[in-house]
Amino acid sequence: DPFYNSCEEHPLTMDEFDNFLHRRGAFEPPKLKEGVKLLNGIRLVLQKNAKHKDTFTPHTISFTADAYQSMVRAMRLPFRAIEGTSVVGPFFWCAYDQDDEDPTLQIIFRKSDVRKKGKTRGWELMLSHCFSSGITSGYVKGTPSSDIVAAIQHLTFCAQQAGHPMLLPIIILSHDLSSTTDQKQRDARDWLRKLEHAVSMRNEIEDEEGYVSQDGHLEVDAISRDLVECHSQVLWKRPQAYQAIVKEIDAGLVKFKEKVPKEHDTPLIDKLHRSMVARLQFYSLKLTGIENYQATTLERLHIQRSALYNLLSQRESKIQFQMAGEQRRLAHASKRDSTAMKTISLLGAVFLPGTFLASVFSMTFFDFAKDADPVISKELWVYFAITVPLTILIVGGWIVFDRRRESQFRVEDADLERNIEHMEADIMAMMRKRTMSKANTWTSVTSPIRP
């Protein structure tokens, strides 16, 4: 009778912990009216918002050793749970215990992640279903980032189905595989289309949604960063891992059906059991679709990453071409400077011997006249008359020669620039033959330009 269904939740202090485990004192079973008996139920120790930063660290429990041991033994929880504190990814285990007289179905269902912002995250579920009494006992822990609060609230509205031990695990699985998982894959595919528009010019989005800045430049850093982030979003909640969970829960349903007594296998429980089997089949097909969808997205991401690397390689090659051109210009400028230095050295070599000899022979140590006279000679003007015009003539000739050489250098510079441009055009043409055209794609109105 649904009128007698009850659901209670109370804070539990450690001084009342043993009383709850052994159903003493305030937690003593209520006295039932004549003709009323308990069909089934769930007794849980809840830790819905575990906030300690190390609560899901391997080999870490949220109780003292004595309290944890008392809980496991009193509720007949699986001892293997202490060994599963370091498992990675979603994990589900279900098996009978070794008590042949009063068997129980033991369940471990947990998922713990690495640290995020200094805190561990995840949830943990340990259950033990007694076939003789129809009562499921267990321990549930979850951090605020988990769906444990919503799952427990969901469980409170399913009092009539409390006799099935797989009820809470499937509720948690339903929250974990909600539409958020599908929506994340859809969002990643939309993100991928924007990246494809930026890298390979696929025309599937509006231009204002792309990665081109207001000044017309492509934001390469943002594209590279978003490629990595989009890849990580696609890998969120790998469907292969949850496919294994679905198979194990399905196997657990079979184990429950094999051992459940007839008095507890009511039409309501049987109907719920068949509904759970159908739901697991639904999740299996849903995960298969996500897996195929995810594989396509990952392959397209790989293509865009390769195309982006090719694009960056082309830009780096162009920069190297520019650097090579500048180096050639510097080499020509150095050659001109060396030519000028040679000219100056040549002029010095021409005039230095004469100047040196004139200076030496003009010293007072030398006197070529028969009768030396300290008076300055009247023919001194001859020296200047010859030296000055000769110097002017030589310097003027050098200036004319240098100007002609500059004009020749300008012609050589123009030839150098043309050669650099031709070299760059030839190499870029060869590169375009090996890479895709950036102006056209297969989805464009016109076909790609053939090389």
Image: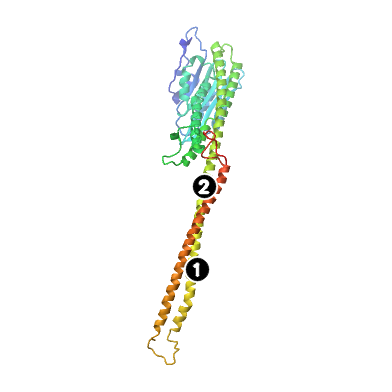
Q: Pick the residue in front: 307 or 401.
A: 401
Mark 2 burial class by Cα count in 10 Å: few <14, some 14-19, many 20+: few
Asked whether 209 or 445 is in front, the reply is 445
The residue labelled by disc 2 is 316
> Is residue 330 at all visible to an observer of this figure?
no
Q: Quadrant of residue 367?
A: bottom left
Q: Compared with residue 376, is residue 27 higher up or lower down, i.e. above or below?
A: above
Q: Could you give the CA–CA distance between mark 1 and mark 2, rounded to whole angstroms?
A: 39 Å
In this rendering, the count of numbered labels is 2
* Residue 51 screen position, x and y as percent: 44, 31
- 15 versus 215 height, above or below: above
Please tell me the numbered disc located at residue 342: 1
Quadrant that contains the C terminus: top right
The numbered dot on residue 385 is none
Q: Earlier in the sequence, mark 1 or mark 2?
A: 2
Q: Which residue type does callout 1 highlight?
A: Lys
